[in-house]
């Protein structure tokens, strides 16, 4: 008897379905996975509701005497950079990796990053393309007067603070470094948008500081302007570098503006915290 292929296929599919049904996994319990907590609060400085995403190290306890460094992440929304940067922090702080100490991550969720991350511009195109811009001074005041005191009061923190910013976030991180350097100990500045306001921030005379600093600057293959201004920032800082400052620069030729952050932060953790351990 000749068996037609369609009929044979039907038999095989039926047998496969029966075997699969017999071995189908039946979940006995499903629970959410949590790596921290989300906090919402009313900012008096910004006059709006703000949200923070907080990563807490494994074993964190408010009753413990142990304290932790804090990593502040701009663009720290759940659908932005909070998850993958928190993953790097977790991985890097494993005892068998020991790239950086166990740390708290504070992801600052965005409301209007173009407003918060930029200072006023005289460039007409900037004003047209980004009509809400120019309020970075308020945002820096928010970080200094509300955010950092709140985090230090609520969590088991030590005095070490790191700031991570990319693109416009890198512009803001540079502005803070130049104007309020003691807000943070470590600065990770990735692909900074220093073209803003006709590159005026590069002509600013940075505020002097006496505390120890580590500064990591990086850029990918992002075009002549982005690559040039990142290099100019490094050279400017190198020119005025003091003994209390560790300064690093990385060019990621295989990365672009969209994917330079993750590798940059990994490399920054290696450079900054390994350097601190060796000192």
Image: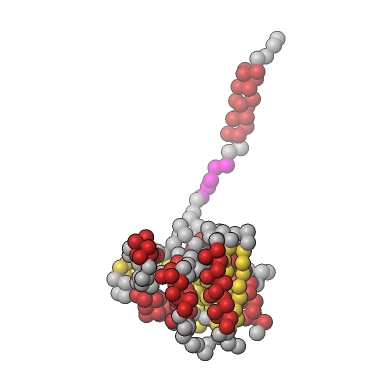
Q: Residue at x 54, y 79 (%)?
A: 236
Q: Is residue 26 magenta?
A: yes
Magenta segment boundaries in residue numbering: 25-29
Q: Residue at x 59, y 79 (%)?
A: 247
* In the depicted structure, whether residue 155 falls above or below residue 91: below
Figure quadrant of the N terminus: top right
* In the depicted structure, whether residue 87 falls above or below residue 249: above
Q: Residue at x 43, y 70 (%)?
A: 198
Observer-nearest residue: 139 or 37? 139
Name the residue at the bottom extreme: 210
Image quadrant assignment for residue 46:
bottom left
Observer-nearest residue: 274 or 16? 274
Q: Position of residue 167 (x, y in %)?
A: 48, 65
Image quadrant assignment for residue 245:
bottom right
Q: Position of residue 75 (x, y in %)?
A: 45, 64
Q: Is residue 152 visible?
A: no
The number of callouts visible is 0
Q: Is residue 2 magenta?
A: no
Q: Position of residue 253 (x, y in %)?
A: 63, 61
- Give the overall secondary structure of the magenta segment: loop
Q: Position of residue 41 (x, y in %)?
A: 34, 69
* In the depicted structure, whether residue 39 falls above or below residue 234: above
Observer-nearest residue: 143 or 90? 143
Observer-nearest residue: 155 or 27? 155
Name the residue at the right extreme: 1
Figure quadrant of the C terminus: bottom right
């Amino acid at each position: 008897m000749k068996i037609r292929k369609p009929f044979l296929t039907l038999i095989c599919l039926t047998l496969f379905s029966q075997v699969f049904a017999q071995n189908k996994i039946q979940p006995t319990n499903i629970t959410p996975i949590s790596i921290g907590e989300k906090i919402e609060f009313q900012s008096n400085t910004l006059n709006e509701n703000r949200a923070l995403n907080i990563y807490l190290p494994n074993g964190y306890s408010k009753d413990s005497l142990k304290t932790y460094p804090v990593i502040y992440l701009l663009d720290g929304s759940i659908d932005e950079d909070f998850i993958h940067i928190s993953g790097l922090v977790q991985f890097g702080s494993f005892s068998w990796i020991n790239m950086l100490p166990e740390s708290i991550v504070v992801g600052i969720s965005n409301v209007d990053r173009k407003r918060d991350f930029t200072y006023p511009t005289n460039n007409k195109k900037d004003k047209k393309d980004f009509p809400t811009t120019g309020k970075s001074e308020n945002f820096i005041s928010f970080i200094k007067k509300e955010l950092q005191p709140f985090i230090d009061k609520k969590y088991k923190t030590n005095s070490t603070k790191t700031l991570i910013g990319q693109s416009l976030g890198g512009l803001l991180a540079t502005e803070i470094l130049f104007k309020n350097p003691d807000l943070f100990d470590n600065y990770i500045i990735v692909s900074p948008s220093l073209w803003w306001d006709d590159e005026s921030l590069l002509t600013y005379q940075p505020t002097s500081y006496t505390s120890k600093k580590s500064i990591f600057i990086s850029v990918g293959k992002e075009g002549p302007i982005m690559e040039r201004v990142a290099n100019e920032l490094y050279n400017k800082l190198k020119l005025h570098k003091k003994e209390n400052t560790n300064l690093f620069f990385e060019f990621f030729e295989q990365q672009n503006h969209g994917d330079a952050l993750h590798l940059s932060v990994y490399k920054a953790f290696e450079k900054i915290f390994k350097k601190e351990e060796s000192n």
